[in-house]
Amino acid sequence: MKKLITTFLVIISLSLSIIPSEGKTKNIQVNTFEYINIPFWQKYNDEILINHLNNMYKNNFDIKIAAYKIEESEKIVKLAFSNELPQIALNGYVGRTLTSSDEKFGDLIIPDYSQYHYLLPLTLNYEIDLWGKNRLKTKSMKKQLDMQREDERSLYIILTSNFAINYYNLIKTDKLIDIQEKLIESQKKICKLIKKRYENGLASQTEILAEEKNLTFLLEEKNNLYEKRDALLNQLNVFLADRSFEEIQRLDYDSIDINIHSPKEISFDVVEKRPDVIKSKLKLEKAGYDIRISKKNILPSFTISGTLGYNAYELGHLFGTKTGLASIGIIPYFDIFDGGKKINIMKLMKSRYNKAFEEYNKNILISMQEINDSLYSTKTSEKNYIITRNRVNIEKEDLRLIKRKEEIGTANIIDTLVKEQEFYIIYQNEVSSKINNIISTINLYKASGGIDIFENNNIQNL
């Protein structure tokens, strides 16, 4: 009896000793600061943008949902780990037996009786992880948790990039509206001058209608720009989880001071650090664990089962010296025939592994394509911005010359206004080109998995 109790207590103490401490549990928490990469965004020299991003990280609903998904996955890992530990329960029983007739056991006769039965045992069930099956299940769940963390990192990168893109599109739209107002004002002056010419017999009604039609086009474009600005403001407020939909503070276009140049080449290491590629690799590793688990499920299992407690028929004697109850044993289990279930599960796991392997290779290829496409787009937009900026300088000089001609009488005010409109249109192109260049750097940052690659100029090409 004493040996059984001692064995029972030893098993309980050993199982409790392998339960992870609170300190170890906290280590699985990920510091999301590394997802944010604020040093990269500081290159844009815009504290307003940085403040908006920090507010988004605190308030955005998608980020909060992702955090709860991580917490949920952590609990699932703990549930998987619990299968590695003994299951100890208190399974008490209180009952009264009532018989109305004699009971015979051979020559032994037990007359009708009534009595209470008190049972107060601890029960133990522990599957011996002889083949390491339960350990592998926990490792498989940890891989699932790591995959969830990569999804969270991907969400941070996407939300941050999309917010910044909308933010700079809003700045661009503000500037385009400002220029559009100048175009409209200039066109109104032209319409007024053409009407005066018509009154003096120097212009036809067709010319008046043509200029008024041009004015309607400009007014229509202004309305479209206002609509686009409202849509961008609404989207940014959703990012910030601001239900008031208040005005979004932003930098003025003329205050933008960014000096970011695209890298000449990008290392293959960048591909391997993308969250989707890492997730594919983790999925492949998890599938490998699942294959090993399915193989070990075919092997026999051994469960230690035991009971330790008290058994009495009188409540006052429940904790007496003669009422102790203890038992322990090993229960082997092996499926002799299950209809091929476990074999088919193993084949299913192998198919999933092969699929995960192909998905991993596919994601690497797609990642290389996306990074290269973004890199080429960044280089092209940077070149186009330089060209557009030079064109604006040429048009500015051309406008200066036409104004000079107007001063000396070789050109009229309408010629000057037309040239001024041409300058404004090209200036709009420069504004769009500059913002598109900035957005291309953000897209490259997103395609690179949130890694700052804009300082690497002498590294291996993809």
Image: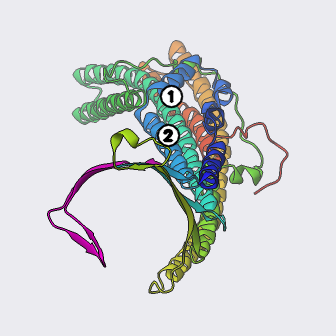
Residue 258 picture location, percent across and down: 66, 26
* Magenta-colored segment: predominant secondary structure: strand
The kind of secondary structure element at disc 1 is helix
**Mark 1, residues whose alpha carbon is within 10 Å: few (<14), some, or many (≥20)?**
many
Quarter residue 412 falls in: top left
Can residue 405 be seen by looking at this rendering? no
Residue 112 picture location, percent across and down: 19, 62
The kind of secondary structure element at disc 2 is helix
Position of residue 268 relative to residue 339, above or below, is above
453 with respect to 124 (left or right):
right
Pick the quarter of the image with the C terminus: bottom right
Pick the quarter of the image with the N terminus: bottom right
Residue 345 picture location, percent across and down: 51, 77
* Residue stretch in magenta: 89-117
- What residue is drawn where x is 66% and y is 64%? 132
- The circle on residue 57 is 1
On whether residue 298 falls in the magenta region, the answer is no
